[in-house]
């Protein structure tokens, strides 16, 4: 990535994935999970659900919802987060296509 100096501070443009920028393993999966959790939070707000109500509707415990709201979703898989969104009234579409790169990548597109 290209670096430059602004006001005496070295800055670097983000790759678009903060997890990759931090060098974390499974950065693409973490970015997808974060996007799913953001949509779950939006759905809960839009529906006016408490954590307890959302937990019941999503089929998980209230402590897991609390963890999710605090940014800890390590105990929930991408599949479970997608199931939570389905239960909150969202459709999920998975698109698979060939890539020109040697290795493909994961991407979350929100409509």
Image (cartoon, rainbow, N blue to C red):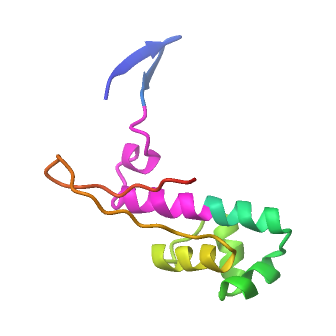
In percent of the image, x 49 and y 12: which residue is there?
Answer: 8
101 left or right of 7 in image: left
Near-viewer residue (85 or 96): 96
The answer to whether residue 73 is above or below residue 18 is: below
Name the spot of residue 16 as percent of width and height, x first: 43, 40
Name the spot of residue 17 as percent of width and height, x first: 43, 45
61 left or right of 72 in image: right
Would residue 87 be seen by someone viewing this image from the given angle?
A: yes
The answer to whether residue 42 is above or below residue 7 is: below
The answer to whether residue 66 is above or below residue 26 is: below
In percent of the image, x 49 and y 53: which residue is there?
Answer: 109
Report which quarter residue 29 is drawn in.
bottom left
The N terminus, quarter of image: top left
Near-viewer residue (33 or 90): 90
In percent of the image, x 36 and y 21: which residue is there?
Answer: 3
The part of the chain drawn in magenta is: 14-37
The answer to whether residue 70 is above or below residue 82 is: above
Near-viewer residue (17 or 95): 95
Report which quarter residue 106 is drawn in.
bottom left
Type of secondary structure dominating the magenta stretch: helix
Specify the farthest residue to the left. 102
Name the spot of residue 2 as percent of width and height, x first: 32, 23
Report which quarter residue 30 is drawn in.
bottom left
In percent of the image, x 21 and y 51: which residue is there?
Answer: 99
Name the spot of residue 52 as percent of width and height, x first: 80, 82
40 left or right of 104 in image: right
């Amino acid at each position: 990535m290209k670096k430059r100096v602004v006001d005496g501070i070295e800055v670097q443009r983000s790759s678009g994935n903060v997890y990759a920028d931090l060098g974390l393993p499974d950065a693409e999966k973490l970015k997808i999970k974060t996007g799913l959790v953001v949509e779950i939070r939006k759905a809960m707000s839009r529906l006016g659900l408490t954590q307890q109500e959302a937990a019941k509707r999503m089929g998980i415990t209230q402590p897991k919802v609390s963890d999710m709201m605090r940014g800890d979703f390590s105990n929930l898989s991408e599949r479970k987060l997608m199931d939570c969104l389905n239960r909150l009234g969202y459709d999920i579409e998975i698109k698979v296509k060939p890539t020109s790169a040697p290795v493909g990548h994961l991407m979350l597109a929100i409509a």
